[in-house]
Image (cartoon, helix red, strand yellow):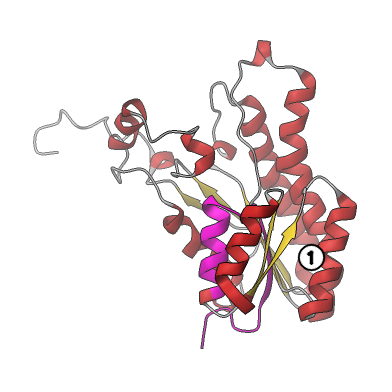
């Protein structure tokens, strides 16, 4: 028996990175998975590799009509949706005084409105199934400020408020809503076309867990929250960041015996 047997899941941003890792793990644990992404060809390739357990869907998470279509097609194929992972997001560096308002708004549209529209779109289906789990992927940038990432950090803080409000409102319907907060995770979005730089490596060496995170560090936490094992968990925030938010791991390095 898989930990997600009988679950019907939509995962956004599932063509690569964290979303792809989640889709592969969910399918391995018995779920049927919609690999949803604006990268249509890459999503189709992932779904094809997963076989009958998966379907690909082209989805711009800022498009409410596209959400409605994906939900309707999923229900027609497999039945009511039980699981949603709002994983799609974008990262954009810029100084606050250099940010164009439209560019800032784009980050909010994808990262926050994408989550909102996902929740709004799947709730009627989840009500039919009698239960549901929604996991919104925030960031440790949603728990602290990040320089030159004002739009991204703002969006990830907003996801926390949205998720907690949704958890309170939807709990009576049997729908749980939680957030996962990855730290520095090695994905195509964070590589910027290359590998982890030496400067980045120095940062990770100062963490309590001295390495860059991987998608396989995050996916099992998302799996747990979507499984029945987390049946009494809602409105919670799970941090996966190697201990970064615990504090400065270098403070006591000069103390004898430390």
Residue 81, quarter of the rendered image: bottom right
Q: Is residue 77 magenta?
A: no
Closest to the observer: 21 or 148?
21
Res. 178 visible in picture: no
Q: Residue furthest bottom?
A: 1
Viewer-proximal residue among 84 and 58? 58
On-image quarter of the C terminus? top left
Left or right, 251 with respect to 126, comes to left
Q: In front: 17, or 147?
A: 17
Q: How many marks?
A: 1
Q: Nearer the viewer, residue 68 or 39?
A: 39
Residue at left 43%, top 46%?
Answer: 241
Q: Is residue 95 visible?
A: yes
On screen, 125 above or below 100?
below
Q: Which residues are magenta?
A: 1-27
> Residue tagged by mark 1?
170
| Residue 201 screen position, x and y as percent | 32, 33
- Image quadrant where residue 91 sits: top right
7 drawn magenta: yes
């Amino acid at each position: 028996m898989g930990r997600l047997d009988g679950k019907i899941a939509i995962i956004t941003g599932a063509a690569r990175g964290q979303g792809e890792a989640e889709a592969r793990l969910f399918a391995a644990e018995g779920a049927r998975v919609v690999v949803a992404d604006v990268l249509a060809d890459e999503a189709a390739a992932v779904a094809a590799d997963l076989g009958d357990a998966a379907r690909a869907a082209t989805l711009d998470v800022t498009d409410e009509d596209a959400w409605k279509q994906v939900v309707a097609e999923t229900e027609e194929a497999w039945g009511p949706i039980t699981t949603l992972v709002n994983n799609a997001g974008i990262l954009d560096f810029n100084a606050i005084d250099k940010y164009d308002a439209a560019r800032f708004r784009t980050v909010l549209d994808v990262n926050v409105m994408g989550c909102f529209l996902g929740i709004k779109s799947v709730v009627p289906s989840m009500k039919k199934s009698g239960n549901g789990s929604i996991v919104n992927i925030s960031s440790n940038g949603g728990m602290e400020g990040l320089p030159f990432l004002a739009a991204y950090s703002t969006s990830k803080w907003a996801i926390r408020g949205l998720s907690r409000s949704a958890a309170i409102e939807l709990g009576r319907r049997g729908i749980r809503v939680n957030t996962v907060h990855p730290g520095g995770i090695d994905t195509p979005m964070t590589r910027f076309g290359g590998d982890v730089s030496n400067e980045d490596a120095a940062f990770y060496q100062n963490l309590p867990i001295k390495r860059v995170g991987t998608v396989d560090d995050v996916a099992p936490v998302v799996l747990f929250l979507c499984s029945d094992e987390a049946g009494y968990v809602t409105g919670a925030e799970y941090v996966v960041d190697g201990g970064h938010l615990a504090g400065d791991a270098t403070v006591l390095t000069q103390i004898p015996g430390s």
